[in-house]
Amino acid sequence: MAGPVILALAELTDGQPTRLSLELATLASDLAVAAGGTAVAAGIGPRAGNAAPTLARHVERVISVEAATEADAPAAIVIASLLAALLEQQTADIVLLPASPDGKDVAGMLAARLDLPILVNAASVAWADGRPVVEMSAFGGRLVTRSTFTGATGIVVVRPGATAARERGSEGSVEVVDLEAAPDPRVTVVERVVSAGAAVSIDDAPVVVAGGRGVAGPEGFAVIEDLADAFGGAVAGTRAVVDAGWLPYAQQVGQTGKIIKPALYVAVGISGAIQHKVGMQTSGTIVAINRDADAPIADFADLLIVGDLFEVAPRLAAAVRARRG
Amino acid sequence: MDILVLVKAVPIVGNERLGADERVDRTVGLEANGNDEYVLEAALKLTEAHGGEVTLLTMGPTAAQEALRKGLAMGAARAVHVIDDGIAGSDARATATVLAAAIGRQRYDLVLAGADTSDGQGGTLASAIATSLDLPYLSYAGRIELTDDGRGVRVQRLSPTGYDVLEAALPALVMGTQVLGEPRYPSLRGIMAARSKETTTLSLADLGIAPDRVGAGAATTRVLDATPPPARAGATVLRTDPESAVAATIDFLAARGLV
Ligand SMILES: Cc1cc2nc3c(=O)[nH]c(=O)nc-3n(C[C@H](O)[C@H](O)[C@H](O)COP(=O)(O)OP(=O)(O)OC[C@H]3O[C@@H](n4cnc5c(N)ncnc54)[C@H](O)[C@@H]3O)c2cc1C
Ligand SMILES: Nc1ncnc2c1ncn2[C@@H]1O[C@H](COP(=O)(O)O)[C@@H](O)[C@H]1O
């Protein structure tokens, strides 16, 4: 008897799988090995054919579905309709979806359409006793839970960093499948607005430098940007600075912003309120610069530099540049 | 323009704990989920501009009343509370079933939900509910307005690089974010007025949902165990002059292979 089929959805941008999608393809491969089953990555999106070879280096089988997700229907609706159609031809026991905005939309749509159970926010996924075991961080990181499905099938929504994308050393097969998308005709995209100078995404940057109210104004953010640049990292901030209009919402870390897990998080002029903490406390290493040694962030940082950020951060940027050459 | 706002009462952030059954303890202090207050604010602004009323809808235990009280004090006209012992331990699928059934019994032009919850289903419920009710679904709203003819909704959906403008005919379900704007504080008058506002309670029987379809017994997911993560070692604190602090920081980072 063949083992379970683990299917990962690959999101595509610019004709390539996103980094998170490659992580999912690798995760599907690892789970298939552990389960004695098969791993499949479904690359659904524009220029799927272009993305397929990259996917095929990470997983034994690729299904490539061309879809115009940049046309006048929202991408998630198009992808959900195609994935539902695909799952009628291609059985899958476990479906891995990326914890991206579109991925989460697709997860809810698919769960409702196919009546599948769903486990969200997977920080890692293992296989035991014939089931996926999904580890997630709960209560803002104060607890780690491991959960599973009571039946054999389900959707797992996987966060960035659950596994590192890894090439297998051999090329998987690629199948092109033609499917007709059936997007909801009642919802249309009338315009796509791209803001000038969109910043490096904080979702999967290995180093994130974040500024808080301590930077004292939009000009103060230059110090944060410079430090991020020295590390080759991305710029983030607290809700306080987003509310103040010093930073776009896409760069907010915390309860109502993003939850991220970089290898290094540098918190500059950030008090470490619980709503901020829940977004970053599973970072590998946390370094804080704060003039208040008793700020809450002192309780969960690995290194606290007590001092004025305007004195410390520029010197740190220079030292990092000198070190990195 | 009648708007239904889905509000979840969540354990006060920072105070969450598990009960003996490894499920979230919901007997402790609950508050309205942060994202749900943003969409409530957007709903109140829309009805202020276009007329109509805001109804709150929650599914949860007795303590969820606290979240409803605040929403009523902010300006919602009434609340619907789905409460039933059989609901405890419901998974995402059962929650969607119950909320969809409850929505189906209300009058509305627009349903609003939050982007996600601090204790919940990671932002997958809104799209599940819209799908099962076959409502047009617009998500990650940073701004919600009516179309010029007043018969549709126009949403700025936040994208990684900016935003997309989406339109749909009403009725529709919109999932919204913090970018919608800071929620108002209830005024004293609002708090007084809330006391005479009506909260309707609905049971599973009222919704025509068989008890064996929801609750812990019907759960399709199961928590195997819950443990605190390995504690951080505690911070190394540098209180020297900036130059030496930076030198020590570089050593610290280098030792961890981070520079
Ligand atoms: C429903 C809800 C959701 C929320 N969601 C989020 C969220 O997603 N993300 C989030 O971040 N917050 C969120 N918050 C807000 C959160 O509660 C805090 O208000 C916020 O995180 C504080 O931001 P801050 O650390 O920048 O500012 P502050 O708390 O004001 O801290 C500023 C820090 O900078 C230090 N400082 C000042 N000047 C200097 C200097 N020159 N040098 C060095 N240090 C200096 C101060 O000592 C202080 O510790 C939410 C709140 C609510 C109610
Ligand atoms: N028990 C509930 N009662 C009312 N609304 C809910 C409930 N659970 C979730 N919601 C709504 O669905 C949104 C997304 O929840 P979730 O997918 O669990 O993160 C929330 O922001 C609420 O608007």
Image (spheres, rainbow, N blue to C red):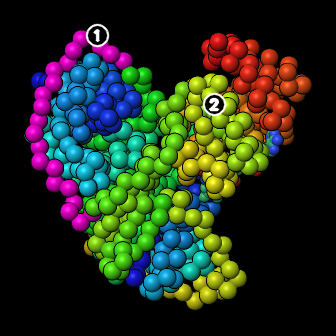
- Whole-number angstrom distance, CA of label 1 to CA of label 2: 34 Å
At x 57%, y 64%, the residue is B181
Say what amino acid the circle numbered 2 marks: Ala
Q: Is residue A171 magenta?
A: yes
Residue B244 within the magenta-colored segment of the rendering: no
* Disc 1 and disc 2 in contact, CB within 8 angstroms: no
Write down the quadrant of residue B1 in the picture.
bottom left
Numbered badge on residue A228: 2
> Considering only order in the chain, which callout, 2 or 1, is on the residue closer to the N terminus?
1
Label 2: chain? A
Q: Quadrant of residue A52?
A: top left
Residue B87, numbered circle: none
Q: Is residue B81 visible?
A: no
Q: Secondary structure at mark 1?
A: loop
Q: Which mark is residue A169?
A: 1
Magenta segment range? A166-187
* Residue B228, horizontal then vertical, whole percent: 59, 35
Instruction: In the displayed orientation, state which residue is furthest to the top.
Output: A169
Rendered location of residue B194, percent (x, y): 59, 84
